[in-house]
Image: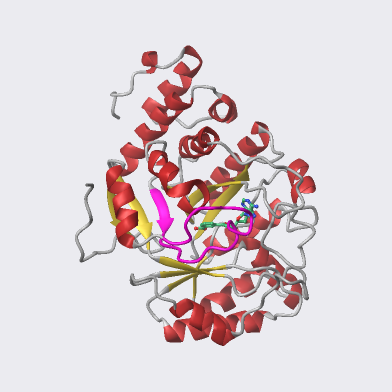
């Protein structure tokens, strides 16, 4: 174990935490609370960077992906108060793509060779599981080499209810139709005190966890998220992170964790504040330190800006998501970031932050890229 980290160089309240990090010891609940509350953000970042470098050196992963949102019509439109994306049928901003429109959307060129479609949407009251299976089959037929990362646990749970079949059955049918893995959305904050306020009536945390447990049991990998920066308290986030860590110990199928910063526009929450840069960096660093069994911590540039994502690479993050091309969920909630970055732009961002970019597939296998990466200047 490297001893280049010297706890005595940290502020006194972080000595014990620093010693545990140096020794590779698992952090407990009290340590996690320290991570989520300490005012010493830069020191927390140093600790997270130590772990990140121990695991990945200076490698930073990205992929070439497209987001596809087949519909934003959602039965939980008024339940999920934080969501600026969902709409009820008939509302002006509601949409539902046909299969052909999904395929056209998928074919949109961002200039790079896409390796992943990230597909999520609202819970449409009338679209059957078969409609979605047909969509997966159609995508696979047209784009056989592209990985389909599709459907949050909320959608999987919804299909199980709608069709009166088990979660396992839904996932098995999806995999037969071409599903590759599950994205991490819908987790929000697991604690019922928060869920009652921000998404009352939506799939509860036990069910979110169950969907991912079943997926992992079937060999389907997935991501996990946490939505912060609204009404939650640090204790709720400790609970959230520890539940994810427990599930990863048990089932082991998570690829990456993505802390998601709450965006306040166009929703019913009645909160007007954006998260600050330090808050965003804290959540990335805290998750790197607490989630010791997650290999990858993702700084989602769409959410925190490419500029902050560069800094995040020194606060524990080792992944910056992908090229995206067209993002809806965050932009309908007020995000003003670009909707697309090219591969070369992503590589430049990573290099200029002092890290080495690695193009990956969805499952984190490195991919060989042909073109040379751009350099500064
Ligand atoms: O579950 C919705 C969040 C999530 C807002 O798995 C909001 O690789 C902030 O999960 N402010 C969907 N957040 C996005 C998501 C995701 C993103 C990137 C990569 C991956 C992955 C997953 O977005 C939702 C919800 O937690 N969200 N509305 C809002 N107003």
Residue at 33%, 23% (x, y): give it. Answer: 5
Q: Give the image location of residue 48, x and y in percent.
A: 41, 33
Q: Is residue 57 above or below residue 188?
A: above
**Is the stretch drawn in magenta largely helix, strand or loop?**
loop
Snapshot quadrant of residue 217: bottom right
Q: Is residue 287 above or below residue 100?
A: above
Q: Nearer the viewer, residue 129 or 188?
A: 188
Q: In the picture provided, is 54 more to the left or to the right than 165?
A: left
Residue at 64%, 84% (x, y): give it. Answer: 130
Question: Which quarter shows the N terminus?
Answer: top left
Q: Nearer the viewer, residue 215 or 125?
A: 125
Q: How many marks?
A: 0
Q: Is residue 149 above or below residue 107?
A: above
Visible in this render: residue 26? yes
Q: Give the image location of residue 56, x and y in percent.
A: 31, 44
Q: In the displayed image of the protein, which residue is found farthest to the front?
A: 377
Snapshot quadrant of residue 316: top left
Residue at 47%, 57% (x, y): give it. Answer: 338
Q: Nearer the viewer, residue 369 or 9?
A: 369
Residue range corresponding to the magenta coloring: 319-340
Q: In the picture provided, is 269 more to the left or to the right than 374?
A: right
Q: Give the image location of residue 210, x and y in percent.
A: 64, 58
Q: Give the image location of residue 234, x and y in percent.
A: 64, 32
Q: Is residue 377 above or below residue 75?
A: above
Residue at 63%, 62% (x, y): give it. Answer: 153
């Amino acid at each position: 174990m490297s001893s280049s980290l010297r706890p005595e160089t940290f502020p006194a309240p972080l000595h014990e935490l620093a010693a545990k990090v140096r020794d590779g010891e698992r952090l407990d609940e009290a340590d996690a609370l320290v991570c989520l509350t300490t005012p010493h953000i830069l020191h927390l970042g140093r600790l997270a960077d130590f772990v990140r470098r121990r695991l990945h050196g200076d490698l930073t992963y990205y992929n070439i992906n497209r987001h596809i949102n087949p519909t934003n019509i959602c039965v939980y439109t008024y339940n999920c108060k934080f969501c600026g994306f969902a709409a009820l049928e008939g509302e002006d901003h509601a949409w539902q793509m046909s299969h052909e429109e999904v395929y056209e959307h998928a074919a949109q060129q961002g200039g790079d060779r896409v390796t992943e479609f990230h597909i999520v949407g609202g819970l449409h009251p009338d679209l059957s599981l078969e409609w979605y299976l047909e969509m997966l089959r159609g995508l696979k037929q047209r784009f056989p080499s592209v990985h389909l990362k599709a459907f949050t646990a909320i959608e999987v749970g919804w299909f199980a209810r709608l069709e009166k079949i088990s979660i396992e059955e839904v996932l098995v049918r999806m995999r037969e139709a071409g599903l590759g893995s599950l994205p991490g959305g819908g987790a929000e904050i697991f604690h019922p005190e928060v869920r009652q306020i921000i998404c009352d009536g939506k799939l509860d945390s036990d069910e979110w966890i169950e969907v991912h447990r079943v997926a992992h049991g079937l060999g389907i990998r997935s991501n996990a998220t946490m939505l912060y920066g609204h009404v939650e308290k640090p204790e709720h986030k400790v609970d959230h992170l520890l539940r994810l860590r427990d599930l990863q110990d048990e089932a082991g199928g998570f690829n990456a964790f993505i802390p998601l910063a709450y965006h306040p526009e166009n929703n019913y929450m009645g909160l007007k504040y954006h998260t600050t840069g330090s808050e965003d960096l804290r959540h990335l660093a805290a998750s790197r330190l607490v989630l010791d069994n997650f290999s990858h911590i993702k700084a989602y540039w769409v959410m925190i800006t490419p500029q902050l994502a560069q800094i995040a690479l020194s606060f524990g993050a080792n992944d910056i998501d992908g090229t995206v091309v067209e993002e809806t969920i965050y932009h309908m909630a007020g995000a003003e970031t670009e909707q697309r970055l090219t591969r070369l732009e992503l590589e430049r961002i990573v290099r200029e932050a002092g890290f080495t970019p690695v193009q990956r597939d969805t499952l984190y296998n490195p991919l060989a890229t042909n073109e040379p990466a751009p350099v500064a200047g």
